[in-house]
Image: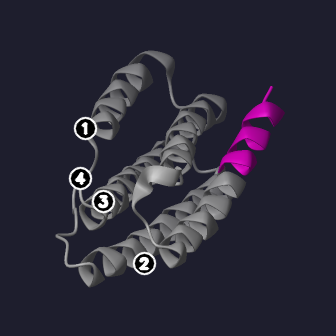
Amino acid sequence: METTEKAIEVLNDLIEINNDRIDGFDRASKELGEGDSDLKALFSKFADDSRRNVQELSAVVRQAGGEVETGNSASGTIHRAWLDVRATFSGHDRKSILEECERGEDAIKKAYRDALTEDNGLSTQNTQLIAQQQQVINEGHDRIKALRDSQV
């Protein structure tokens, strides 16, 4: 596969998983109760981080002459459907919501790690952009994990 095509594929994969993350945090916010304004604000921030990631990645794809992916990943769609089923049976308490958010954060961390492999076809500049985004993603994951671990 040509380097530019490979790079566009990698970038579009990251766009899809960021779209998954936006949808996941929006959905999680709706599941939270009245006393969970702290999590709602945090989830909103994380969704906004991913919106910014999508904008930056989309600009790079367009600059490379590619078609920007606008949807979600198949695995993200399946995960959200599974969350709906699980929520029906387990309720919507903070801990279960944070557990599901952590699963989503694990997936996006893996996607960024995979994107930064040597055969990704990305320029040094684009690799730096993805590494910067990865740092924010990792910080989000760590915050969700710490909150989850603090729940009794």
Q: Which residue is mark 4?
A: 1
Residue at horizontal 50%, vertical 46%? 108
Q: Nearer the viewer, mark 1 or mark 3?
A: 3
Q: Which residues are magenta?
A: 141-152
Picture coordinates of residue 143 (x, y %)? 74, 50
Amino acid type, mark 2: Glu
Residue holding disc 2: 56
Marks 4 and 3, Cα distance to the nearest angstrom? 15 Å
Q: Give the numbered dot on residue 74.
A: 1
The amino acid marked with disc number 1 is: Ala
Counting residues from the N terminus, which is met first, the one under dot 1 or under dot 2?
Answer: 2
Q: Please tell me which residue is depicted at 24% across the width and 62% down the height of the picture.
A: 5
- What kind of element bears circle 4? loop
- Residue count near mark 1 (Cα–Cα under 10 Å), binned few <14, some 14–19, many ≥20: few
Q: Position of residue 136 (x, y in %)?
A: 65, 63
Whole-angstrom CA distance, mark 3 to mark 2, is: 11 Å
Label disc, if present, on residue 12 of the rendered structure: 3
> Is 50 drawn above or below residue 143 in the view shown?
below
Inspect the image, locate mark 3, and give the three-letter code of the amino acid beneath it. Asn
67 left or right of 98 in image: left
Badge 2 crowding class, 10 Å Cα cut-off, few under 14, some 14 to 19, many 20 or more, is: some
Question: Which three-letter amino acid code belongs to the residue tagged 4?
Answer: Met
Residue in front for this viewpoint, 18 or 33 = 18
Q: Mark 4: few, some, or many residues within 10 Å (few <14, many ≥20)?
A: few
Disc 1 element: helix
